[in-house]
Image: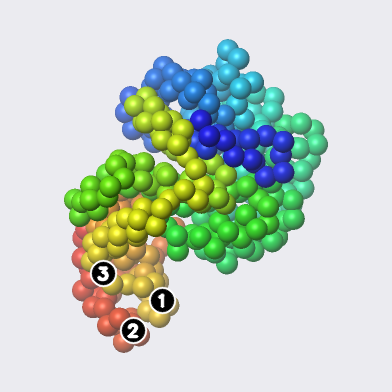
């Protein structure tokens, strides 16, 4: 296992960390609450025995059961071998006092007296301003550090680069952050600029979704051919993981593993993790794979937002993005889940009345009214 320095701490983290969001389950009813505990525990202990020393979970994972199973897995001496990270469910904070209530509930679930790394979960501009700042949550987190319940304060992130920079600059004592980053997301969410900005500030960066929820592990045929043509023989998963590890700004990669085979394969790959190791030919291969994915995008929307505001409050670019992602990654079921569960407050294609005001504003001259109807049918 390769290790990297974790910011200013006198501690090195394994290149591969264990994400407990996709543990093996007996079925996915109730949001995956029915975890196969024996298999999950065996996987986590195998990972720890083979050098993985950072385990990440969160309040909502597996409908609240992930923290419980992580706690069970780290009994029998394993807790002393690893660091544990979990996340405050910021969307449940309605007042200053909710922080302690939720943190104490998580400590009980984990059956631990101390959490090493504590993240404010899924921050963006709105939650930073209206939840964290409004309720003085940073002060509560600092108090929890002083009384020993948590060790280090960080945040995970889902918004855009401007929001990321604002949050980084909004608190001068962040000890780490967590962002989504992979070879298809260099210009999404925190972007490559965010990765570099955090590193410039000396803030360790934990990377989530290096395989984009498994989508980069199962590429379509036109992308497979790119990798097969390379002299460097790697699986699609290895290409994606090694590309992220190639960035010296990346501190560790979280992988949400669902089987022992995935754990074994990812550990084998992590044994070869190295920064600045890709040759020009390898970077060219990744660039070609990215291009082949992008060629599969059926709607040429650039998300310029000129079509907004819609008089009926349809979030046109977001609808097109979800549909495009489903087509690009050959994962319409996943796109339907995003559309149904995680779209936010309104904005779905269903609201379109075919007024065509948007089409007059679109610089790409996209037939928005026609395509938004197709999106509505495809994602229903």
Which numbered circle lies on residue 304?
1
- For residue 365, which quarter of the picture? bottom left
> Image point 76% across, 31% down: which residue?
148
- For residue 10, which quarter of the picture? top right
**Vertical placement of 350 versus 172: above or below?**
below
Which numbered circle lies on residue 299?
3
Give the labeled residue for mark 2. Answer: 363
Give the mark nearest the N terminus, 2 or 1: 1
- Pointer 3: residues within 10 angstroms few (<14), some, or many (20+)? some
- For residue 303, which quarter of the picture? bottom left
Residue 161 visible here: yes
* Dot 3: element: loop
Question: Cβ–Cβ below 8 Å for labels 2 and 1?
Answer: yes
Give left or right: position of 259 versus 117.
Answer: left
Q: CA distance from mark 2 to mark 1?
A: 9 Å
Give the mark nearest the N terminus, 2 or 3: 3
Q: CA distance from mark 3 to mark 1?
A: 13 Å
Give left or right: position of 72 versus 114.
Answer: left
Percent x, y of residue 160: 52, 63
């Amino acid at each position: 296992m390769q290790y990297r320095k974790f910011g200013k701490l006198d501690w090195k983290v394994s290149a591969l960390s264990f994400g407990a969001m996709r543990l093996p389950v007996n079925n996915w009813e109730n949001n995956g609450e029915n975890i196969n505990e024996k298999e999950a525990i065996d996987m986590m202990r195998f990972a720890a025995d083979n050098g993985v020393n950072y385990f990440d979970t969160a309040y909502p994972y597996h409908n609240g059961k992930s923290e419980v199973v992580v706690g069970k897995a780290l009994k029998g001496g394993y807790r002393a071998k690893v660091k544990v990270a979990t996340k405050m469910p910021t969307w449940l904070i309605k007042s200053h006092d909710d922080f302690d209530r939720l943190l104490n509930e998580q400590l009980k679930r984990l059956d631990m007296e101390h959490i090493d790394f504590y993240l404010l979960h899924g921050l963006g501009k709105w939650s930073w301003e209206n939840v964290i700042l409004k309720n003085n949550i940073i002060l509560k987190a600092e108090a929890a550090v002083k009384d020993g319940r948590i060790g280090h304060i960080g945040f995970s992130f889902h918004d855009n680069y401007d929001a990321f920079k604002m949050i980084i600059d909004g608190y001068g004592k962040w000890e780490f952050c967590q962002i989504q980053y992979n070879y298809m997301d260099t210009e999404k969410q925190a972007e490559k600029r965010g990765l570099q900005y955090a590193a410039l500030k000396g803030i360790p960066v934990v990377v989530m979704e290096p395989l984009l929820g498994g989508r980069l592990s199962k590429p379509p045929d036109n992308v497979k051919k790119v990798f097969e043509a390379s002299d460097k023989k790697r699986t699609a998963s290895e290409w994606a993981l090694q590309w992220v590890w190639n960035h010296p700004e990346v501190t560790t990669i979280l992988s949400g593993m669902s089987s022992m085979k995935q754990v074994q394969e990812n550990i084998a790959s992590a044994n070869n993790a190295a920064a600045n190791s890709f040759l020009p030919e390898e970077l060219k291969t990744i660039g070609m794979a990215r291009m082949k994915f992008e060629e599969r995008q059926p709607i040429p929307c650039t998300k310029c937002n000129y079509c907004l505001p819609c008089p009926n409050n349809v979030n046109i670019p977001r609808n097109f993005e979800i549909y495009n992602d489903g087509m690009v990654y050959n994962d319409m079921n996943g796109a339907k889940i995003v559309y149904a569960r995680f779209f936010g407050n309104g904005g779905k294609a269903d609201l379109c009345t075919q007024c065509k005001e948007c089409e007059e504003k679109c610089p790409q001259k996209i037939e928005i009214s026609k395509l938004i109807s197709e999106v509505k049918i495809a994602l229903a």
